[in-house]
Image (tube, rainbow, N blue to C red):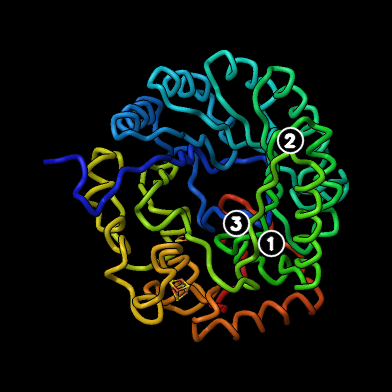
Amino acid sequence: MPLAAPQIGLPIGILAELTHRCPLRCPYCSNPLELERREAELDTATWKRVFTEAAGLGILHVHLSGGEPTARVDLVELTAHCAAEGLYTNLITSGIGRAGVMIGPLAEAGLDHVQLSLQGASAENADRIGGYKGGHAAKLAFARQVTDLGLPLTVNAVIHRGNIHEVEDMIALAVALGARRLEVAHTQYYGWAYANRAALMPARADVDRSVALVEEARRRLEGVLVIDMVIPDYYARFPKPCSGGWGRRTLNVTPTGRVLPCHAAESIPGLEFWSVRAHALGDIWRASPAFNAFRGTDWMREPCRSCERREMDFGGCRCQAMALAGDAAATDPACSKSPFHARVEALATAEAAATAPGYVYRTIGGASALPQGGRT
Ligand code: SF4
Ligand code: FES
């Protein structure tokens, strides 16, 4: 059997969600509401096999993620294995917990890059959002360790109503920390973020201001800091090509080994996911029903089917279509051509104008505390 049929390209990246354990409790987390427990996680040998298979598939980048990946005591061993397989490793970390003691050994093991999350620019606000006192100070110390080791640092700042007033300060902080790249990522509403949407949704005027600030900073900081920006879907005109298109570029492996085309794919009912416990990664990429469900453009209906942008954004995000239109094969309601778009924009405007409810903090086993019933 050839490695890939003509219409199935080869993946370039793999997001390894090594664990859902995390000391932080961010209400904007995109992890599923039902978080996996430690006992169910893949063991070291299985992760190593997965990384070997990933390299064999031609994958270039491994994102070591979670939860907090440094909660895995075998992270140094896994990183060394990835390096030996020729994979470029990116540690996606909160910088808290064991991150500080692990970063030296990780660098020695061949870690290539660190992506550090910041919840805000001020300690008080960041610790409130992350639900962890002292977290911000620990992150700043961790960032210094990273740059002292000579590792490239990217700062990831998820933006929402609770910190959008700090965008300017976060840009300045990223520069002060010696980051080479900053991601100003407006919240994507999946998992815990979807449950907290009313608390997180910013007003359009604040979004517009943040975009202007980033554009000005990009000009001012050229050659110093690269700033990526993720625009909030609910106020967008066109959707993003989620995950680079379903089953086109990347795969996600959950802590227990299920392989998903995107991090929220399990929110789509009826999809069949294969596990690395039972299948080789290449077989999953080529033949797993979930990966083939929305590959290419044949599954599209109007207005996507005849749209000139269908090979640019691939109809947007399937998980958002499921959440907001009740149909994973519908046009992403972030698109202005979707019949649901006006309703979604109005909903965002109304939520942003209302008094923000308190956060539902992310916790393992905490999904049962969420309000019951569906919501658009
Ligand atoms: Fe993209 Fe579909 Fe909207 Fe066209 S109609 S811009 S393909 S989501
Ligand atoms: Fe699943 Fe966008 S998060 S397709």
- Mark 2 or 1, closer to the camera: 2
The amino acid type of the residue labelled 2 equals Gly
Residue 304: x, y in percent?
39, 76
Which is more N-terminal, label 3 or label 2? 2
Res 98 → quadrant: top right
Res 220 → quadrant: top right
Dot label at residue 360: 1
Q: Residue furthest top?
A: 108
- Mark 2 or 3, closer to the camera: 2
Residue 115: x, y in percent?
63, 36
Q: Is residue 127 visible?
A: no
Which is more N-terminal, label 1 or label 2? 2
Question: Tag 1's secondary structure?
Answer: loop
Question: Tag 2's secondary structure?
Answer: loop
Residue 76: x, y in percent?
52, 20
Residue for badge 2: 223
